[in-house]
Amino acid sequence: MKGNRGFDTAAELRLRHALFQRGHRYRKEYRIVTPSQSCRVDIAFVKRRLAVFVDGCFWHGCPAHGRVPRTNDAYWRPKLQRNVERDRANDAALRAAGWTVVRLWEHAPVDDGVATVEAALAGFD
Ligand SMILES: [Zn+2]
């Protein structure tokens, strides 16, 4: 089972590759220190202050695939709940610092992710 953050997921790599091919330039695994906390952003468009996360379905509680494992529920449920709470806290901290936050599920088709990111970037023009 993959760990929570700390390395690239396949979905994140696919999205980064597609964005790069379409001419976008970004920073990966970019650390943003806000007054309330330090956040690591999967894909950051720094000048535009656009933060993109590709969330793993399991770790981030995807409504379609984010099931809590049946074994050891007492361990997993609070752990996964903390992940979701941390995501929301990161979103709030980044937005308070002037960033736009986009979250994509790892199950989403890469074309949809590209479209979402490009729509967010277009919003700055
Ligand atoms: Zn999912």
Image (cartoon, rainbow, N blue to C red):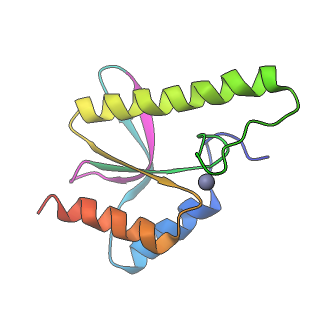
Q: Quadrant of residue 117?
A: bottom left
Residue 33 shows in the view: no
Q: Quadrant of residue 98?
A: top left
Q: Position of residue 82 (x, y in %)?
A: 59, 24
In the image, farthest residue toward the right:
71
Classify the position of the C terminus by image quarter. bottom left
Residue at the (55%, 69%) spot, across then down? 14
In the image, farthest residue toward the front:
64
Q: Which residue is nearer to you in this view: 84 or 97?
A: 84
Q: Which residue is nearer to you in this view: 81 or 89?
A: 81
Q: Which residue is nearer to you in this view: 78 or 18?
A: 78
Residue at the (29%, 67%) spot, across then down? 118
Q: Position of residue 23 (x, y in %)?
A: 32, 77
What secondary structure do most residues of the magenta stretch adopt?
strand
Q: Position of residue 80 (x, y in %)?
A: 65, 30
Q: Position of residue 70 (x, y in %)?
A: 85, 34
Q: Which residues are magenta?
A: 37-49
Give the total of numbered labels. 0
Q: Quadrant of ligand 1?
A: bottom right
In the image: residue 36, left or right of residue 11: left
Residue at the (36%, 79%) spot, across then down? 22
Q: Is residue 36 magenta?
A: no
Residue 62 shows in the view: yes
In the image, farthest residue toward the bottom:
21
Q: Is residue 45 magenta?
A: yes
